[in-house]
């Protein structure tokens, strides 16, 4: 865990009457997460004809959960407020030994989860299922794979992220898509598997799910999702001086204590408080007008 430390004090310069204020802030290292995340799905020794699998389970809210497939990074996600995570990962042909860890803001790791085994057996290929883990030979069977341990936890808004794209296997040319999670998508064509970089600057702080997809000339695809943490507090949006938040539905509706217009939710209580004096004046004028008849 990480602890934010802020120290403030008043000091006076020797020989001078003036004083000033000194503030020091920083992040102090605490103990790493003591408990391991869990894997609740899929079950151990699961068999599938698919080349991907959704791994989900329990975790500590706000920590970054990383999934490893036969000792190779397979993706990451931020643990949600309900203490759950879910992540779709690529599988190699044959045996996949899957383990999960969770990391704090200082990238300190928890213990490993229990290891589960997933067998990927494509219907058009006879794959021998080994009795023991053989990660090196397993990876060799996979024709296209993204093999990089992405770790972006302290990115600053408006500063470019220099993202390495590293993959192997398949047959060129390759189509590469990078979805940055903020409605920005980069499309690149590559003739070889040589590493290159994609650059992007986030406008707003928050947690983003970055998706990389690579397709080769034979129709093979590789996917990888990982968590991108951008520092800072989210910008407060206001409408007529009233704080608003984004609503999940784009349809207008009324649900006490808020009114939803499009994708904007306005608190009814805040609105009434802000505009009650004006509303009162209108009612008084109507009352006096009607009373004067």
Image (spheres, rainbow, N blue to C red):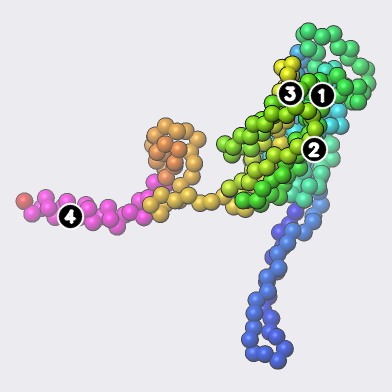
Instruction: Indicate the position of residue 18 as horizontal and vertical percent values.
Output: 63, 86
Q: Earlier in the sequence, mark 2 or mark 4?
A: 2
Q: Secondary structure beneath disc 3? A: loop
Magenta span: helix, strand or loop, mainly? helix
Which residue is label 3 attached to? 173
Real-space Cα distance between discs 3 and 1? 11 Å
Instruction: Indicate the position of residue 70 as horizontal and vertical percent values.
Output: 86, 28
Q: Are marks 1 and 2 in contact (CB under 8 Å)?
A: no
Which residue is label 4 attached to? 285
Which stretch did the figure color magenta?
A: 267-292
Crowd band around label 3 with a 10 angstrom C-alpha radius: few (<14), some (14–19), many (20+): some
Q: Secondary structure beneath disc 1? A: strand
Real-space Cα distance between discs 1 and 2? 17 Å
Query: Is residue 156 visible to the viewer in this orientation of the structure?
Result: yes
Q: Are marks 2 and 4 in contact (CB under 8 Å)?
A: no
Real-space Cα distance between discs 4 and 1? 77 Å
Q: Is residue 98 left or right of residue 282?
A: right
Q: Is residue 51 left or right of residue 82?
A: right
Q: Secondary structure beneath disc 2? A: loop
Q: Earlier in the sequence, mark 4 or mark 1?
A: 1
The image's mark for residue 169 is 1
Real-space Cα distance between discs 2 and 4? 68 Å
Q: Is 279 a magenta residue?
A: yes
Please tell me whether mark 2 or mark 4 is closer to you in this view: 2
Q: Is 277 a magenta residue?
A: yes
Crowd band around label 2 with a 10 angstrom C-alpha radius: few (<14), some (14–19), many (20+): some
Q: Earlier in the sequence, mark 1 or mark 2?
A: 2
- The residue closer to the viewer here, 160 or 104, is 160
């Amino acid at each position: 865990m990480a602890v934010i430390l802020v120290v403030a004090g008043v000091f006076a310069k020797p020989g001078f009457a003036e004083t000033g204020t000194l503030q020091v802030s920083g992040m102090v290292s605490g103990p790493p997460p003591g408990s391991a995340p869990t894997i609740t799905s899929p079950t151990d020794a699961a068999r599938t004809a698919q080349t991907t699998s959704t791994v989900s389970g329990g975790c500590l809210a706000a920590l970054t959960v990383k999934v490893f497939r036969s000792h190779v990074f397979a993706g990451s996600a931020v643990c949600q407020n309900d203490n759950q995570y879910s992540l779709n990962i690529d599988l190699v042909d044959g045996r996949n030994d899957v383990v999960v860890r969770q990391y704090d803001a200082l990238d300190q790791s928890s213990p490993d989860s229990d290891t589960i085994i997933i067998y990927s057996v494509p219907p058009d290929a006879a794959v021998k299922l080994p009795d023991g883990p053989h990660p090196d030979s397993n990876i060799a069977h996979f024709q296209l794979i993204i093999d990089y341990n992405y770790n972006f936890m302290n990115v600053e808004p408006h500063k470019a992220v220099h993202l390495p794209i590293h993959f192997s296997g398949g047959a060129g040319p390759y189509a590469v898509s990078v979805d940055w999670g903020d409605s920005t998508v980069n499309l690149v064509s590559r003739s070889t598997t040589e590493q290159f970089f994609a650059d992007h600057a986030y406008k707003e702080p928050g947690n983003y799910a970055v998706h990389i997809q690579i397709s080769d000339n034979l129709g093979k695809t590789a996917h990888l999702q990982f968590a991108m943490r951008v520092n800072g507090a989210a910008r407060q949006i206001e409408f007529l001086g009233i704080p608003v938040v984004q609503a999940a539905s784009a349809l207008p509706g009324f649900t006490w204590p808020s009114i939803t217009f499009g994708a904007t939710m306005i608190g009814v209580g805040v609105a009434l408080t802000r505009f009650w004096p004006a509303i009162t004046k209108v009612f008084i004028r109507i009352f006096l007008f009607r009373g004067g008849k």
